[in-house]
Image (tube, grey):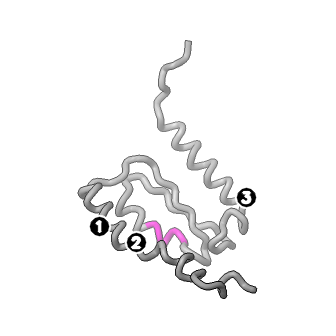
Amino acid sequence: MYEYTKPGYLRSSIGWYASVLEDAVFFKRMFNGSKIEAPILYLGGEASAPAELAGPYWEKVGSHVTAVTIPESGHWIGDENSEIVADRIGEFFGEVRESIPAAGLGN
């Protein structure tokens, strides 16, 4: 028997989308027009949600957004193009690390 034919499967698997509008109201109230200041990395597959599509939405909530399209991939970018994903994550955290001042905890 396929999982999706079981009673309640579809409702439970997509039910979390029902809260999207409520979440939007909550976050508008919490952020009160301000943006996330921490660097944000968005990775999207070219056949699913490329940077050109999703990047502008992240820029509405973040001041420092890096949006990257992962080529030759869809929804499962880590499985479909793991080398590019790892490279982009490494580049992002390398840049972030260089921009954060040392805590001065050395001897």
Instruction: State the predominant SS element of the stretch in magenta.
Output: helix
> Mark 2: which secondary structure?
helix
The answer to whether 94 appears left or right of 16 in the picture is right
Could you say which is closer to the camera, residue 40 or residue 32?
Answer: 32
Badge 3 local density, few (<14 within 10 Å), some, or many (20+)? Answer: few
Instruction: Identify the residue shown where x is 66% and y is 59%.
Output: 85
Spot the residue most to the top: 107
Which residue has dot 3 on it? 83
Could you say which is closer to the camera, residue 92 or residue 19?
Answer: 19
First reached walking from the N terminus: tag 3 or tag 2: 2
Look at the numbered discs 3 and 2 and tell me whether their residues touch, using CB distance below 8 Å. no
Could you tell me the amino acid type at mark 2? Ser
Which residue has dot 1 on it? 25
Q: Position of residue 64 (x, y in %)?
A: 41, 52
Could you tell me the amino acid type at mark 1? Val
Q: Position of residue 12 (x, y in %)?
A: 54, 76
Above or below — where is 97 with respect to 107? below
Which residue has dot 2 on it? 19
